Amino acid sequence: MKIVSWNVNGLRSLANDGYWESFLKTAKPDIFCLQETKASPDQLSEVFLSPAGYSAFFSSSEMKKGYSGVALYSKTEPLKVIYGMGIKEFDQEGRLVGAEFPHFWLLNVYFPNGGQGPERLDYKLRYYDAFLKYAERLRKEKPVIFCGDVNTAHEEIDLARPKENEEHTGFLSEERAWIDEVVAAGYVDTFRRFHPHTKEAYTYWDIKTHARDRNIGWRLDYFFAANECMKRIKKSEIHPEIYGSDHCPISITIG
C-alpha cells in the first residue's frame, strides 16, 4: 500500500496543465491525502470529487471559501471517517480528515501557519497540543499514522538556511519543541528513519523568489507513524520531481 501526502496550494489549480492526471499516473497512490485544497466540495468538478477507483472525503473551512481545507482519497473504503477533533475552534478551518483502516488510523492534517502575528502563533501552538492529545486518544484503539503540512522544520538539516530563520515562524524553538514532544511520545519521523543523514531534502520552496530552482527549501511535510507501525513501513520518500504546487508530494509504502 502506498500513501501519498501533498500540500497542493489550491486543488482546482491542479486542473491546469494536466498536473492532476500526471500526479495520479506518476504517484499511483492507494491512499492520497491533500492539504490546502482551498475548496469546498461544491466548488469542485467531478474529476476531483470522484476520481476513478477512489472514495473521496473532504473537510473545508466554515469561515471562508477558498481557505485551508483537506481531502482524503482511498481505493479501500475506510471503516470510519472523522472530520476534525471535535473542538470547534480548531475544526472550523477544515484542517483534519482522518480514516480508520483495519490496522491503523490515518490522520491527514494541514497544521496552522504561525505567521501574521503572535495571536496566530499562539493558535498554532495550541492546535499542536490539542492534536497530539487527540492522536494519543485514537492510539489507544489502534496505531496512528499522521501526515501533512506540519508548517515547521524540525532540525537544521531540514531547511537550507537555518541560522537566518531561527527567529522566523516555521523554525522557532517553541515550534520545533512540539515535534520533539511528538517523537518523545513514540511517533517516528519516517523520512528521517530511512534517510537519517540526507541533506537538501525539502518539500517546500518559496515561489516568489524562485527558490525551487536553487533548492533553497524547507522540509515542512511529514509522515509520522507510531512506533508500533514501523515494522510494516518499508519506504518513506520525497518526490521533488512532481510539480504543481509550492510543495512537493511525500509518500510511505506499507508492506
Image (tube, grey):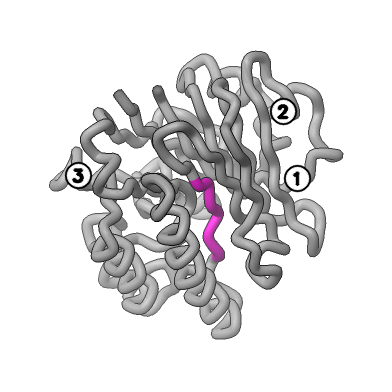
Q: Earlier in the sequence, mark 2 or mark 1?
A: 1
At a point 48% along the width and 52% down the height, the residue shown is 149
- Hey, which quadrant is residue 165 in on the image? bottom left
Q: Is residue 254 above or below residue 69?
A: above
Residue at the outermost front position: 141
Q: Amino acid at mark 3?
A: Arg
Residue 110 lies in the magenta-colored region: yes
For label 2, the residue is 48
- Any part of residue 114 in sight: no
Q: Using residue 59 as the reference point, say whether residue 21 is left or right of it.
A: left
- Hey, which quadrant is residue 173 in on the image? bottom left
Residue 185 in percent (x, y) is at 28, 63
Label 2: how many Cα within 10 Å (few below 14, some 14–19, many 20+): some
For label 1, the residue is 39
Q: Disc number at residue 193? A: 3
At a point 49% along the width and 34% down the height, the residue shown is 101
At a point 40% along the width and 23% down the height, the residue shown is 1
**Which segment is the magenta one?**
107-112
Q: Using residue 6 as the reference point, say whether residue 40 is left or right of it.
A: right
Residue 202 in percent (x, y) is at 34, 46
Residue 31 in percent (x, y) is at 51, 28
Q: Are marks 2 and 1 in contact (CB under 8 Å)?
A: yes
Q: Nearer the viewer, residue 194 or 170?
A: 194
Q: Amino acid at mark 1?
A: Ala
Q: Secondary structure at mark 1?
A: loop
Q: Is residue 93 above or below residue 253?
A: below
Q: Secondary structure at mark 3?
A: helix
Residue 46 lies in the magenta-colored region: no
Q: Nearer the viewer, mark 3 or mark 1?
A: 3
Q: Is residue 21 above or below residue 9?
A: above
